[in-house]
Image: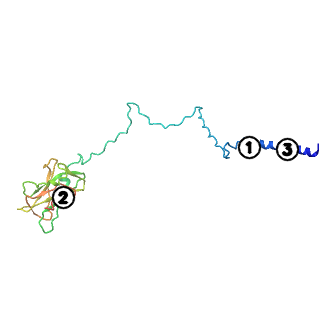
Amino acid sequence: MNTAARTSHRGWKYCVLGAATVTALLATTACSPSGDDGGDGKPTARPSAPATPSTSGAPSTPSVTASPSTPKPGATPSTKPTPAPTGTGGSGGSVALCAPGDVTITSSTEDEVGKAVRHILLTLTNTSTKPCQVYRYPLIQLGDARLPVPEIKESAPTPGTPYDTIAPGKQTHAALLLNGPMDEDTAKTMTVQLQDTKPGSKKGEPIKVAFPGVDMVYWNDFAKVTHWMTAQGLALRFIMSS
């Protein structure tokens, strides 16, 4: 065998071995875990981690929000007792009526100086150490008049009840209109009597009250007086237009 023939045969063998090697490498690459069937080169998603089993060994169950408990038949829900209201409201029944020894009564006028006194404001002050009540309107006697001065009914806050409870040192007022356009009589004295609970009844003895700055006044059948009230301006409003 010549040298050229041996060389050609050896080169053919090496060529066959090289082709087999390349084929094996390609097969290995196709079965690699990093590849996929789609050929896009992206890694496949990993499977999610399995749920952690419960410590007791029993299969886990999903949690469910508990619904409110249903009361048993015949059962009543427990409730806190409602506190009873305190206080009696209003003036109450424990406050006594004002007696003549519990108060002082003074007079003033809204008329101009030098003119006849026609409008008088009476001011009652509680001089005692306890609250007391005055009922309705003062019973006013002018001079020798047979009857007391009638009331102005429109001034009554609540008919048949005391106007107010007067605290120690506090005041209430009543306004007196003396006369109108007709014949007049004269009076040199004036007394004020407090009413008892019954309309027209008297509480204690009459209280003598001096006229405001004069010794005598003129009066007639137009005379009238308001109920007791704490606002002196309101009391005067009932008589100043007359």
The image's mark for residue 235 is 2
SS state under label 3: helix
SS state under label 2: helix
Residue 240 at x, y percent in the picture = 15, 62
* Between 160 and 146, the one nearer to me in the picture: 160
Residues at marks 2 and 1, CA–CA distance in whole angstroms: 116 Å
- The residue singled out by tag 3 in the image is 14
Looking at numbered disc 1 in the image, what kind of residue is underneath it?
Answer: Thr
Looking at numbered disc 2 in the image, what kind of residue is underneath it?
Answer: Ala
Q: Is residue 14 visible?
A: yes
Residue at the spot 14% in from the left edge and 53% down from the top edge: 153
- The residue singled out by tag 1 in the image is 29
**Residue density around tag 3, few if under 14, some if 14–19, many if 20 or more, within 10 Å:** few
Residues at marks 3 and 2, CA–CA distance in whole angstroms: 139 Å
**Residue density around tag 1, few if under 14, some if 14–19, many if 20 or more, within 10 Å:** few
Residue 155 at x, y percent in the picture = 17, 55
